[in-house]
Image (cartoon, rainbow, N blue to C red):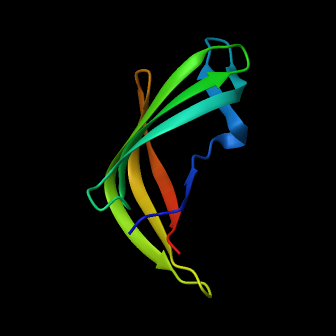
Amino acid sequence: MKSFFRIVLILFVGGTCSRLARSAPSARALVAGSIESQYEDNGLYHRGFCCDLTDDRGERYELKGRVVRFIPFRHRPTGHITHIGQGMTEFTCRSRVAYGLSEYMDLVR
């Protein structure tokens, strides 16, 4: 199935990138970003992605996500079919690793 509308949600706490400094944590607003996604052969299930993010001081971050486990959902509101894929994801940014959910949503028709 070909998607004609794809939504990729990457949620960050308050749209910021937090860094731990020696004295106290600091947060910087994210002002720009792009994403490149990798999919399974069926084109619906994401298996990973790479985000290029820029904060308000011009510092760039590469955030990579690798889907460890995947759950496909299908939502059928009146007249539409939507595929929703949730992945338990390993996130890597610089040398730090964290785990959480990534979600892709495709409005198929």
Q: Does residue 23 sit above or below 85 in this rendering?
A: above
In the picture as drawn, the residue positioned furthest to the left comes out as 41
- At x 51% / y 64%, what residue is drawn? 106
Q: Give left or right: position of 50 versus 59.
A: left
- At x 47% / y 49%, what residue is drawn? 100
Q: Quadrant of the N terminus?
A: bottom left
| Numbered disc total | 0
Q: Give left or right: position of 4 versus 85.
A: right
In the picture as drawn, the residue positioned furthest to the bottom comes out as 78
In terms of image quadrants, where is residue 96? top left
Is 107 or 91 nearer to us in this picture? Answer: 107
Image coordinates for residue 107, horizontal then vertical, percent: 54, 68
Image coordinates for residue 86, horizontal then vertical, percent: 44, 61
- At x 42% / y 65%, what residue is drawn? 2
Q: Does residue 50 sit above or below 76 in this rendering?
A: above
Image coordinates for residue 20, horizontal then vertical, percent: 60, 20
In terms of image quadrants, where is residue 55? top right
Q: Does residue 23 sit above or below 97 in this rendering?
A: above
- At x 31% / y 57%, what residue is drawn? 69
Is 1 or 20 nearer to us in this picture? Answer: 1
Image coordinates for residue 83, horizontal then vertical, percent: 47, 70
